[in-house]
Structures are given as C-alpha cells and as structure tokens.
Amino acid sequence: MTILLITLTVLTAILWIWALVDISRSRFENQSMKWLWIILIFIFPILGSLVYFQFGKKYTKDSKKFNPDFNKNS
C-alpha cells in the first residue's frame, strides 16, 4: 500500500511539473490565458494538468518551425 501511494504521489508531481514547464515555455495568444492555466493547475493539480494537456494547446500560438530548403540552387 505504501509503495502504491508513493508511486501515485511521484507520478502526480511529475505531471504537475510537466504541465507547469509546458505552460511556461508555450506562447499563448493572450498572456492572461497563461496565468489562468497556472492558477488552475495550482488550485487543482491533477485535474488542472489533465485539462490543460487536453484543451490548453488550442490557445497557444504556432511556434515557428525551422524548415530550410537545402535543394535550392544558389
């Protein structure tokens, strides 16, 4: 029972930290949305993190992708 509780606590902490790091690195369309997600995750660590990973990405800007054209003759 103790091993299960420790495992669940560690997995919850990893999920929580992963969500916070992802929010801090993401570029949101509106900065207030970033703070809203952070507050939501602090109030509801497990549920807030799961909801963020399910729905939060639609509020972020698309990051610029590095796409060089090496076939171009110059």
Image (spheres, rainbow, N blue to C red):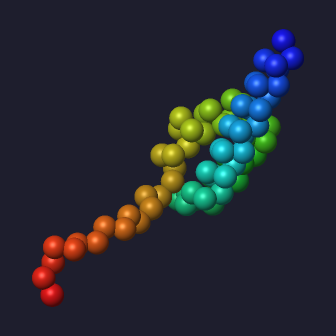
Q: Quadrant of the C terminus?
A: bottom left
Picture residue at 63% right of the left edge, 52% below the top: 23
Return the residue nearer the eye: 29 or 7.
Answer: 7
Picture residue at 22% right of the left edge, 74% below the top: 70
> Residue 31 falls in which quadrant of the image?
bottom right
Relative to 9, residue 64 above or below: below
Q: Quadrant of the N terminus?
A: top right
Furthest-bottom residue in this view? 74
On the image, the x and y values in percent for residue 67 come to 31, 67
Q: Can you see residue 24?
A: yes
Return the residue nearer the eye: 37 or 5.
Answer: 5
Return the residue nearer the eye: 53 or 55.
Answer: 53
Relative to 27, residue 39 above or below: above
> Residue 4 falls in which quadrant of the image?
top right
On the image, the x and y values in percent for residue 63 come to 45, 62
Q: Can you see residue 36?
A: no
On the image, the x and y values in percent for residue 46 come to 72, 31
Q: Is residue 32 left or right of residue 3?
A: left
On the image, the x and y values in percent for residue 43 come to 80, 37
Picture residue at 51% right of the left edge, 46% below the top: 57
Q: Is residue 33 left or right of residue 13?
A: left
Furthest-front residue in this view? 3
Picture residue at 82% right of the left edge, 19% below the top: 3
Furthest-top residue in this view? 1
Return the residue nearer the eye: 55 or 22.
Answer: 22
